Image (cartoon, rainbow, N blue to C red):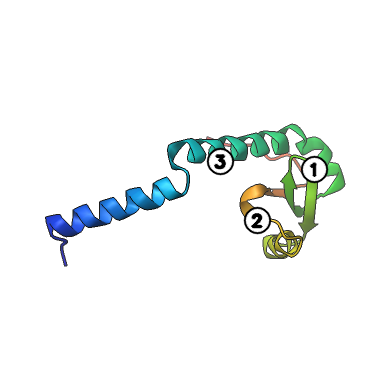
Amino acid sequence: MALTEEQRREALDTAIVAFEKMGGGAALRAELEAFQNLRLLVYAKYPQLQQEYPNQWIAMNEDGVVAFGESHEAVMTAVRDRGMDMSDVALEYIDSEDSALVL
């Protein structure tokens, strides 16, 4: 069922209002930058993480590893049990061996 022009406009207006209530573009940019910084931190510490958490899933924030386990579900549960939001951590599987990327 196709939307009418009026329905499309209403949907767009609703989406714009919701986006603005969430802080708009500046808030989105800040969240993406924070996520990118967490990913860079994980990659910078990866050799150390391989020694401490081989073949484990980890959740890491700016302060370090906040949870680890054998499954991402267990780690996500541990993060939530600590009262944290998953958007505040990077979730990563730490392989015990370096893997080659073949393109």
Q: Is residue 77 above or below residue 91?
A: below
Q: CA distance from mark 2 to mark 3?
A: 13 Å
Q: Is residue 101 left or right of residue 76?
A: left
Looking at marks 2 and 3 on the same chain, the residue that comes earlier in the sequence is marked by: 3
Residue at 44%, 49% (x, y): give it: 21
- Residue that numbered label 1 is attached to: 64
- Residue that numbered label 2 is attached to: 85
Q: Quadrant of the N terminus?
A: bottom left
Pick the front one: 86 or 70: 86
Amino acid type, label 3: Glu
Residue at 40%, 48% (x, y): give it: 19
Q: CA distance from mark 3 to mark 1?
A: 18 Å
* In this rendering, the label closer to the viewer, 1 or 2: 2
Looking at marks 1 and 2 on the same chain, the residue that comes earlier in the sequence is marked by: 1
Amino acid type, label 1: Gly
Marks 2 and 3 close (CB-CB < 8 Å): no
Q: Residues within 10 Å of mark 2 (few under 14, many from 20)?
A: few
Dot 1: element: strand
Amino acid type, label 2: Asp
Dot 3: element: helix
